[in-house]
Image (tube, rainbow, N blue to C red):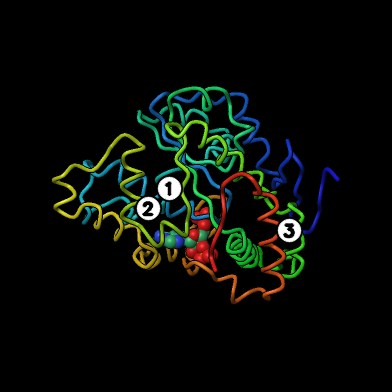
Amino acid sequence: PKETRWQPYVLRLYEGFWWWEGIIPGIIGIQQRFKARPNDVFIISFPKSGTTWLKALTFSTMNRHKYSFTNHPLLRLSPHDCIRFLELIYCQGEESYAESLTSPRLLCCHTPYSCLPDSMTTSECRIVYICRDPKDVLVSAWYMDKNYIPDAPLSFNQAFEVFCDGRSGAGPIWDHVLQYWNESLRRPDKILFLNYEEMISEPHQNLRKLAEFIRCPFSEEEEKTGVIEQIIELCSFNKLKELDVNKKGEGFSNIENELFFRKGVVGDWKNNMTLEMAERLDEITREKLHGSGLTFSSR
Ligand code: A3P
């Protein structure tokens, strides 16, 4: 099938991935018209993999000399207002916004690697990709849909089947992740491949890696004075979740900001699926990633 309808939204197959119908013009806009600059930084992910967190961390790392931690834009703006989604910029006819940003620009998208324009794949721009255990991605996406769309059309069991079939929004997840993983092996200077679970367990190490990769490494002085800790604290789940803007504000596509801050933990799948379901999804993931060198472990 080229189209899957379950009220209230329609997913359409576009170049091998299932997209919310309204997003496709945005992906086409990026493919056909977006011109990356050599010093751009892009945050890219499969939805619900930790994009919001990575936006906050990258924004505060890149702009750490510009803002103080006590009067920081992230205290009054959602991470999604600080770094916007390119697909939405194109859907909303705001291409001039992307062009008007001063370099180095910081932008975000969910577009698969195979759909990126040449300027993004061949220029010196940097891509930071975050992946997450598919079981937790599915759970996170299901709650998002349930809360965003009050008459959510799918039960968890139905959503599980659709996800396993690769026909959920932006799916199949394995193809999305593998495209970026393979490219990160080929060009590690170009794509930094991060993992939500490892960022939770080793935040300092991962933040150092991120800062070096986006060409603004922490100095010895910054290491000594605790700048890394301050960034981690500012961007922590508990800190961001409790801010007024993230509790009450409405973000892109009329999605309330609070929906981006649910639990922020590893392994919430355990509370939402049976062991049999988890084993089945793990088996599909193992098969799909076989031979790639990439594994997930959120036991
Ligand atoms: P859960 O639904 O499992 O809690 P995305 O930003 O890609 O939409 O992903 C959302 C997921 O990231 C949600 O997962 C959300 O709670 C979690 N998240 C948001 N901010 C976070 C933070 N600062 N630290 C850790 N996880 C965070």
Q: Is mark 2 within 8 Å of ligand 1?
A: no
Decide: marks 2, 1 in contact (CB < 8 A)? yes
Q: Is residue 15 left or right of residue 83?
A: right
Q: Nearer the viewer, residue 117 or 215?
A: 215
Q: Tell which circle, 1 or 3, labels the residue nearer the N-terminal end.
A: 1
Q: Which residue is identified by label 3?
A: 164
Residue type (three-letter) at the residue carrying disc 1 = Asp
Q: Which residue is identified by label 2?
A: 77
Q: Residue at x 69, y 62 (%)?
A: 281
Query: Where is residue 8 drawn, in percent x and y?
Result: 75, 58
Q: Is residue 69 left or right of residue 127?
A: left
Secondary structure beneath dot 3 equals helix
Q: Nearer the viewer, residue 38 or 131?
A: 131
Q: Which image quadrant is residue 117 in?
A: top right
Q: Is mark 3 within 8 Å of ligand 1?
A: no
Q: Is residue 111 above or below residue 243?
A: above
Q: Can residue 258 be spotted in the picture? A: no
Q: Tell which circle, 3 or 2, labels the residue nearer the N-terminal end.
A: 2
Q: Residue at x 56, y 56 (%)?
A: 48
Secondary structure beneath dot 1 equals helix
Q: Residue at x 34, y 44 (%)?
A: 209
Q: Which mark is residue 81?
A: 1
Query: Where is residue 269 drawn, in percent x and y?
Result: 59, 70
